[in-house]
Image: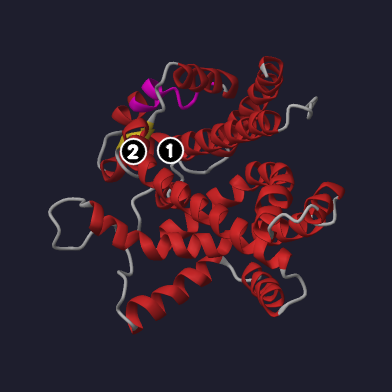
Amino acid sequence: MIKLIRRRLAVAVPVLFATSVGMFLLGASSPMDPAMQYAGAAAFTTSPENMAELRANWGVDDPLPVRYLRWLGNLLQGDLGWSTTRHEDVAAVIGARAGWTLLLIGITLAVVLAGSLLLGTIAAYRRGGLLDRGLRAGAYAVESMPVFWLALAAIAVFSLALGWFPAGGLTDVRATGTGVGDVAHHLVLPVTVLAVSQTPWFLLFVRDSVAESLRDDHVLAARARGLAGRTVLFGHALRTALLPFLTLVGTHLPELVGGSVLVETVFSLPGLGAVSVQAALGSDFPLLAAITLITTAMVLTANLATDLAYTAADPRVRIDG
């Protein structure tokens, strides 16, 4: 495992470096002037001398390699820069909102894994039946629906028509704090929408993997010994199918993060997703670059954790990649 971690770090460092270069070049190619963005409305009334001094202090006119190395050095020291759209430190913006995004993704991932494992296993056990055909048809239908469309449809039905759940935000407008019950009530729709949009691939994968495992020799032998169907299904077939399922979880995480951006935007949640959209629309390079690098690091870490879990679950498996 130590060798695996070293190999993954050897890959992660170049990936993060390439991502930082790409984000910096993207920001440098923007027609927006960082000094003008920082000054805001005052830029139209500030004297040219003051603007020139501001540009000199920021090093806006320095050569591109010099600006990149200065920005990279600040990043390595923990200085993520100044958000031109939020008018505060990037670290403060991310620190105040990352927790809500992690909460949304964490709860959604738990719901997706539990639901897909249970439904996929049952569908495989009753393959060809009405439940199996219905789940597969529903999975293919949901997979073709954009997540923002599902979010808008959920708001129209469950918020506007039925009034069961709030249409957005984390707390009631009259609330003076963030109570657990209030937050949970507001997260029902966002979590459900994001989970429904991410479940199809997991469900279909589990269904096919378990169906294949049911034909393995050790599963057939367990049936021949007279073990209960539930024991054979969950104790033998599902356990065999879990190993490739772990890999799917790691590779699917970027899509889950991308879906959370749209869900947070539609439901007006104060997470990193909505802030990322605002940063992109406002050409807020420091904030957008920091979020992109953090997201990339999270995905790389999740893939490493998946590989470690895979080798821990089956010591016979050796990952050389």
The residue positioned farthest toward the bottom in the image shown: 161
Residue pictured at 41% horizontal, 46% vertical: 101
Residue pictured at 60% horizontal, 51% vertical: 255
Q: In this rendering, does residue 200 appear at all?
A: no
Which residue is tagged 1? 287
Q: Nearer the viewer, residue 14 or 37?
A: 14
**In which quadrant of the rendered view does residue 38 lie?**
top left
Q: Nearer the viewer, residue 35 or 241?
A: 241
Going from the N terminus, do you reach mark 2 or mark 1 first?
Answer: 2
Q: In this rendering, does residue 2 appear at all?
A: yes
As drawn, 16 above or below 215: above
Instruction: Tell me, yes or no, whether the highlighted magenta stretch contains residue 61.
Output: yes
Which residue is tagged 2? 93
The magenta segment: 54-62
| Amino acid type, label 1 | Leu
x, y percent for residue 122: 65, 65
As drawn, 88 above or below 65: below
**In which quadrant of the rendered view does residue 298 lie?**
top right
x, y percent for residue 142: 62, 71
Is 102 left or right of 30, judged from the image as shown? left
As drawn, 143 above or below 23: below
x, y percent for residue 181: 24, 57
| Amino acid type, label 2 | Val
Residue pictured at 72% horizontal, 65% vertical: 125
**In which quadrant of the rendered view does residue 85 lie?**
top left
